[in-house]
């Protein structure tokens, strides 16, 4: 698919659930949230149908996410089925890592292509403060074995002033003796995140260089997203930056997002979206023409560039959208 600005759209971020086993302060309010009723979430059959239509339209890469994708029963089987679909070349997943240990064998057998794990801190007390949950030891046990996995693993960190900004260099150090890529992602002011102060790429880089030396741009490819990568002296892995606030990457954006409830979004910014669930459940039999036509029309609404200045964006909840 080609949008109105000439960008090729070939990547779908697929949220399979709004549920999560953590309650991160920049994602959920302290009073908790009301989960979507099961009937309001796309069934696996509906997800596979949408992915099939998308593949025919040119989507080749799928990122399975949540909430926490592993909280949805049989998600490994779903990944296996998506991986086997004609036209789908790459299936990856993002996770907070706490439940991963018991699912790794299944994900390997499902032929998962790559995995992203969130690591916002290397301190158990800070983990508890950020996530309002237990699970630090489980996460660390997975991080210790990432070099033994048969697919590449990237570590994602969201630096936030007053929460984990003192740990930037330590977290970057995970790439020193491991082949992983550690990526630092600028916090976007969506939902509860609007209550916190983000760190821009420039400051994050300065913290890393104070400890490890000069970051040298890496020209190779390490994935399908907007991250830019750097090398450090003596490091096996790479350091990456995803900087939606300080360095717009909209000119190369190739993605759509499908929420667990079936809302297809061309961009995190703005209010454009397609209620795929209603289209699916209102179409007759297995006729996918209505779905395909609706998706193609939505792609033409993809904006040239995102903007988070609108205060309406603060009402969005990343755990429902698919972070």
Image: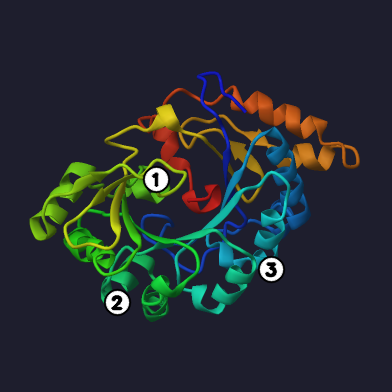
Tell me the distance, in whole angstroms, between the alpha carbons under discs 2 and 3: 30 Å
Residue depicted at x 58% and y 76%: 105
Where does label 2 land, which residue? 124
* Residue for badge 1: 221
Determine which of the numbered discs, if any, sits on residue 141 in the image.
none
Tell me, yes or no, whether the two marked residues, 1 and 3, touch with CB atoms within 8 Å.
no
Decide if residue 99 is in sight here.
Answer: no
Asked which secondary structure carries label 3, the reply is loop
Q: Which quarter of the picture shows residue 248?
A: top left
What is the C-alpha distance between the residues marked 2 and 1? Answer: 33 Å
Report the front residue among 115 and 20: 115
Tag 2–tag 3 contact (CB < 8 Å) = no
Residue plotted at (26% across, 47% down): 198
Query: Of label 1 and label 3, which has the lower sequence position?
Result: 3
Residue 311 seen in the figure: yes
- Percent x, y of residue 191: 42, 46
- Indicate whether 241 appears above or below 249: below
Query: Badge 1: few (under 14), some or many (20 or more) residues near its Cα, within 10 Å?
Result: few
Disc 3 designates what residue?
74
Name which quarter of the figure residue 176 lies in: bottom left
Closer to the chain start, of discs 2 and 3, is 3
User: Within 10 angstroms of label 2, few (less than 14), some, or many (20 or more) residues?
Assistant: some
- Percent across and percent down for residue 195 are 31, 48
Mark positioned earlier in the residue sequence (2 or 1): 2
Disc 3 crowd rating (10 Å Cα; few below 14, some 14-19, many 20+) is few
């Amino acid at each position: 698919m080609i949008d109105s600005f000439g960008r090729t759209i070939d990547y779908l971020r697929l949220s399979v659930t709004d549920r999560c086993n953590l309650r991160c302060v920049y994602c959920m309010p302290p009073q908790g949230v009301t989960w979507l009723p099961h009937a309001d979430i796309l069934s696996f059959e509906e997800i596979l149908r949408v992915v099939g239509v998308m593949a025919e339209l040119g989507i080749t890469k799928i990122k399975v996410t949540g909430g926490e994708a592993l909280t949805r029963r049989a998600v490994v089987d779903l990944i296996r089925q998506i991986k086997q679909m004609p036209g789908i070349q790459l299936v990856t997943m993002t996770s907070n890592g706490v439940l991963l240990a018991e699912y790794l064998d299944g994900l390997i057998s499902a032929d998962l292509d790559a995995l992203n794990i969130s690591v916002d801190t290397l301190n158990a007390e800070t983990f508890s403060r950020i996530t309002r949950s237990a699970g630090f030891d489980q996460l660390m046990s997975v991080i210790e074995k990432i070099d033994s996995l048969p697919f590449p693993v990237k570590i994602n960190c969201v630096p936030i002033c007053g929460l984990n900004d003192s740990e930037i260099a330590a977290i970057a150090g995970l790439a020193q003796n491991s082949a992983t890529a550690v990526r630092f992602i600028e916090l976007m002011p969506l939902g509860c995140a609007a209550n916190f102060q983000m760190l821009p790429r420039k400051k994050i880089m300065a913290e890393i260089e104070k400890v490890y030396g000069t970051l040298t741009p890496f020209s190779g490819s390490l994935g399908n997203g907007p991250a830019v990568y750097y090398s450090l002296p003596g490091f096996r892995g790479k350091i990456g930056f995803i900087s939606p606030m300080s360095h717009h990457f909209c000119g190369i954006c190739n993605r759509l997002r499908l929420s667990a409830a079936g809302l297809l979004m061309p961009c995190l910014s703005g209010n454009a979206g397609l209620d795929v669930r209603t289209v699916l459940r209102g179409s007759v039999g297995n006729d996918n023409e209505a779905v395909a036509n609706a998706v193609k029309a939505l792609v033409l609404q993809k904006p040239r560039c995102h903007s988070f200045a609108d205060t309406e964006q603060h009402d969005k909840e990343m755990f429902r959208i698919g972070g």
